[in-house]
Amino acid sequence: IKRDSRFAEITPEHVEYFKGILGKESALIDGVTKDATDDMEPFNADWMRKYRGHTKLVLKPGSTEEVSKILKYCNDNMLAVVPQGGNTGLVGGSVPVFDEIVIQMGRMNAIRSFDEVSGTLVADAGCILETTDRYLADRGHIFPLDLGAKGSCHIGGNLATNAGGLRLLRYGSLHGTVLGVEAVLPDGTIVDELSKLRKNNTGYDLKQLFIGAEGTIGIITGVAIQCPQRSKAVNVAFFGLESFEKVQKAFIEAKGQLGEILSAFELMDRNSQRMVKEYTNNKSPLEDEHPFYCLIETSGSNSEHDTEKLEKFLEDVMEKEIVLDGVVAQDETQIKALWSWREGVPEAIGGFGGAYKYDVSIPLAEMYTLVEDTRVRMEEAGLIGDSDSHPVKDVVGYGHMGDSNLHLNVSVRRYDKAVEKALEPWVYEWIEKRSGSISAEHGLGLAKKKYIGYSRSETMIGLMKQVKNLYDPNGIMNPYKYI
Ligand code: FAD
């Protein structure tokens, strides 16, 4: 891609203007008038260290009004921007491609209100997910979304990517739980749609456009969201199985026997668990190795009752020879330890170099076949092996089984064009043939921008372009990505 020459380059005068708006010295990192190359690094590099931008200016607004002034000025002066939350996105959407200004939302991190009767939370977009969830825990509630990057990601970033995560099975998608959004459009208009109503059928539901827009039509500054009561009893079981067929049988049994308390059903293959083991040196929860592992979480109101149900379920599926071996966590520490075998997979894979990551939706029956077919493809191309001369270390599958959402990770010792060429567009064609989605939850960003056509029709892409042009006619919002 080439830098779009319609965009202006940042000058010392621009920097002076932003200094005037933001007031605080710490709210602006400036490599235009001073040499701040080191300070810029974390804002220019993504979580996977796969994408690198060259911003010379990072702005950290402290209020919606500041965001509005910044965007209006950028729009008037044709300065391109990238909204950035916790920078944990996995498709290269959160870092600049060239010298776009980074607008980092971390200073907008206040809880605005919480109503314990309805469970409605209103908070700034820059609140960190884990901090927000802890605030809710103290009040007997839970954020209806949880994911491995919770310690860094922002709730605004979660909305912008329409994050799915570990509990979608129980609490549904953000398109259902988000009640209202406050956002700023590129021309500085503040869209005040922070409705706290669960029901509001008065025209188009425009807030939905910001959910999953990846910062391409405006910046989300505030969020109103419906938070469920925190379950008094949370239990976790971890078990091993011999085939993906058995995994599907276990899922049917879990829905049947644990339906109303089931809050997560996660899948990990043997290779993913080997990598976590190698990376952390932790002792595996089960004695023997198995081709597949599942983690089940239940959330209910009666600990004794739920434990009994879960233990009975495990007994039953072992008796029916669906599951080979399993454990149920006995306390909070064991719950965390079992979860770490699922949540620790991305970090472990990253620790060995990098990964080509495909976060995809596939009808369940064929979900794991993609991992097997990918391995064959890497073998045929001579790219996978134990020695350093092979770029690919392993092909790994894990994900949110309960949502038919697979994370296919091709773990590499180093990023290599030959690997990418063997994978793309082959992976996307494979998914298109099964009517799946090339992006189940991470979005399109830079990584998947070219491939949207594998999951959306010309008509739909055309409509999306119209929306983009209407909200952002100058195209300054997160350019070079999405559509
Ligand atoms: P960023 O990475 O900073 O930004 C992501 C995108 O949103 C960018 O396009 C950015 O421009 C835009 N954006 C950010 N903030 C705003 C804003 N306030 N207004 C407008 N646009 C904005 N994702 C899942 O869905 N499910 C998972 O289970 C999951 N697990 C993960 C586990 C790990 C270990 C990691 C590293 C990532 C995982 N992700 C997962 C991906 C990522 O964490 C989520 O996409 C997360 O929602 C991104 O939030 P963020 O604040 O880090 O956003």
Image (tube, grey):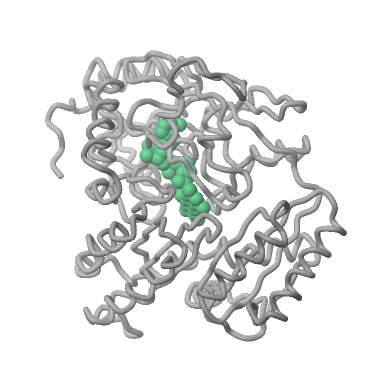
Q: Please tell me which residue is depicted at 53% across the width and 27% down the height of the picture.
A: 108
**Image: 374 above or below 288:** above
Screen quadrant of the C terminus: top left
Q: Position of residue 66 (x, y in %)?
A: 44, 17
Asked if residue 141 lies left or right of residue 427, the reply is right
Q: Please tell me which residue is depicted at 49% across the width and 67% down the height of the picture.
A: 348
Residue 32 in view: no
Residue 243 in view: yes
Q: Position of residue 402 (x, y in %)?
A: 56, 57
**Image: 166 above or below 412:** above
Residue 27 location, quadrant: top left
**Image: 158 above or below 15:** below
Q: Position of residue 335 (x, y in %)?
A: 72, 62
Residue 310 location, quadrant: bottom right
Screen quadrant of the N terminus: top left
Give ligand 1's quarter of the image: top left
State the residue in front, 434 or 327: 434
Q: Please tell me which residue is depicted at 63% across the width and 86% down the height of the picture.
A: 288
Q: Please tell me which residue is depicted at 61% across the width and 77% down the height of the picture.
A: 240
State the residue in front, 368 or 290: 368
